Image (cartoon, coloured by chain):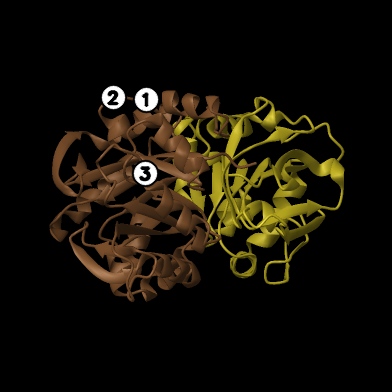
Chain colours: A yellow, B brown
């Protein structure tokens, strides 16, 4: 059973619809007991880091997520889900889950013509092979909406990069956890393919874990 | 870097597709769900649905349309028309809309922008502005005036000032729709689009007047727009979404070309 984690952080039905489009039945649940029994977990979210963390803790989901990672359950983080997986977010100076060592920082751009949030379609360049990103071709673009980006402590956790003035990490991996800053559920076929690959992934990655 | 976006707008009345010409008389042109899916499969970057249903008792139909489209189209979906309250916005979001457009109701009660931004996030609230050229005057020094109610009611509000106010109140994006150009197929208002795009730090979507690929190219370069919105150009089969994107990419404009 795939469980999409509901922690009052945005509309999760778009992720559920995208799963349905690739033939996956996914349950939306914020119940710690249900999440704990999941075969695989999707951890999406939009909104602010601090309120998301409050909500996760209130539902006891922070511990469930840590346990799932330790148990080897394949997990996919999306957008805010990725961001609150790191150790700290500059957004509201928030201590976050620490599933991936590192920080989340706000874009600081010199070019006044570049807008924040970084919103729209941008190319994703895979820099480290990973089964979930395996089908992404050079030049494939995904849909982004975010004002903060992840800066993991270890470069070996970066799976893909995107350019916005400089480059930033747009996909991270650590053991059985893979996470994207972009929205695969809103990125057309290339995004749906990513979700389909996640659904088949055994949670094993040959890269260097932290 | 970010690609420029090609956005198709579908006007929906009583659940059916319609296309306005200068905001009067609309013609039914088909089923919004199949049209949306067709454009999505042809590489569209974003879809806008505008509910032009006159009677409020038929608004529920729009939620069903959004729900049906969201189940088939996996790109950002933006919906507007008749959004008057935070509840309207959250209902549409729940049905599957990513972004919510506010227009007339925000002009009449600007706090709606801030309320929606709080409820659904700045990035998801789009301020859509219908604008007409006027003699520059004390009320409208920019020479552009805000018009509401589908182009029928001039408000004596300066369009540039309203764009800046919308940004300040928390809008994440602006639609600049030139009423003078709308439906003419003679090109976007480049001057108006650039005036607003240069003044704000949020993305600007140019709307109204597209008839030829060079019109899109012009507004995305000289007009400084982040996205170009089309309707009749693609609705009647004169152009395809992928054909337009290829044309723009061929002119050196960065577009998403694989899907």
Q: Is residue A181 left or right of residue A207?
A: left
What's the distance in space between the residues labelled 1 and 2, CA to CA? Answer: 7 Å
- Which element is circle 2 on? loop
Q: In front: mark 3 or mark 2?
A: 3
Which is more toward the observer, A69 or B111? B111
Q: Which mark is residue B188?
A: 3
Q: Are marks 1 and 2 in contact (CB under 8 Å)?
A: yes
Task: Give the image location of residue B216, x and y in percent.
Answer: 43, 37
Quadrant location of residue B215? top left
> Of A65 and B177, which appears nearest the observer?
B177
Query: Mark 3 to mark 1: distance in Å?
Result: 19 Å
Q: Position of residue B37 (x, y in %)?
A: 36, 31
Tell me: residue B130, above or below residue A159: below
Q: State the mark number for residue A180.
A: none
Q: Are marks 1 and 2 on the same chain?
A: yes
Please name the residue shown 36% across and 47% down the image.
Answer: B207
Which of B155 and A55 lies nearest the eye of the viewer? B155
Residue A16 visible in the displayed image: no
Same chain for mark 3 and mark 2? The answer is yes
In this picture, is B106 found above or below B31?
below
Nearer mark to the viewer, of 3 and 1: 3
The label on residue B240 is 1
Q: Residues within 10 Å of mark 1 (few under 14, many from 20)?
A: some
């Amino acid at each position: 059973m795939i469980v999409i984690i509901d922690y009052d952080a945005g509309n999760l039905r778009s992720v559920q619809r995208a799963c349905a489009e690739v033939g996956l039945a996914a349950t939306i649940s914020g119940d710690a007991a249900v999440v704990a029994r999941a075969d695989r977990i999707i951890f999406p979210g939009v909104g602010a880091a601090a309120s998301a963390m409050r909500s996760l803790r209130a539902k006891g989901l922070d511990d469930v997520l840590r346990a799932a990672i330790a148990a080897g359950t394949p997990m996919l983080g999306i957008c805010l889900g990725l961001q609150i997986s790191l150790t700290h977010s500059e957004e509201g100076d928030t201590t976050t889950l620490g599933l991936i060592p590192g920080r989340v920082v706000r874009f600081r751009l010199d070019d006044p013509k570049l807008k924040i949030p970084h919103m729209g379609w941008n190319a994703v360049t895979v820099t480290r092979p990973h089964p979930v990103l395996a089908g992404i071709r050079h030049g494939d673009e995904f849909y982004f909406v975010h004002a903060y980006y992840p800066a993991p402590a270890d470069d070996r956790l970066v799976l893909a990069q995107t350019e916005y003035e400089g480059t930033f990490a747009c996909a991270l991996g650590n053991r059985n956890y893979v996470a994207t800053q972009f929205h695969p559920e809103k990125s057309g076929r290339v995004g749906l393919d990513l979700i389909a690959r996640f659904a088949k992934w055994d949670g094993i990655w040959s890269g260097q874990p932290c | 870097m970010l690609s420029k976006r090609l956005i198709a707008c579908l006007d929906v009345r009583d659940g059916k597709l319609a296309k306005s010409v200068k905001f009067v008389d609309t013609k039914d042109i088909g089923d919004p769900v199949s049209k949306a899916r067709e454009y999505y499969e042809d590489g569209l970057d974003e879809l806008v649905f505008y509910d032009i249903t006159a009677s409020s008792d038929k608004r529920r139909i729009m939620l069903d349309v959004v729900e049906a489209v969201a189940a088939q189209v996996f790109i950002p979906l933006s919906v507007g028309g008749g959004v008057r309250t935070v509840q309207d916005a959250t209902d549409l979001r729940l049905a599957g809309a990513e972004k919510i457009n506010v227009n007339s109701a925000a002009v009449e009660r600007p706090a709606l922008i801030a309320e929606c931004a709080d409820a659904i996030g700045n990035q998801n609230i789009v301020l859509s502005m219908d604008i007409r050229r006027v003699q520059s005057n004390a009320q409208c020094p920019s020479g552009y005036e805000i018009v509401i109610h589908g182009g029928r009611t001039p408000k004596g509000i300066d369009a540039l000032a309203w764009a800046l106010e919308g940004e300040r109140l928390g809008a994440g994006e602006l639609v600049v729709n030139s009423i003078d150009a709308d439906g003419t197929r003679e090109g976007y208002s480049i001057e108006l689009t650039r005036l607003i795009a240069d003044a704000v730090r949020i993305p600007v979507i140019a709307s109204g007047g597209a008839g030829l690929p060079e019109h899109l190219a012009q507004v995305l370069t000289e007009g400084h727009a982040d996205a170009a919105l089309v309707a009749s150009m693609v609705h009647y089969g004169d152009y395809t979404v992928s054909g337009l994107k290829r044309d723009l990419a061929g002119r050196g404009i960065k577009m998403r070309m694989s899907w």
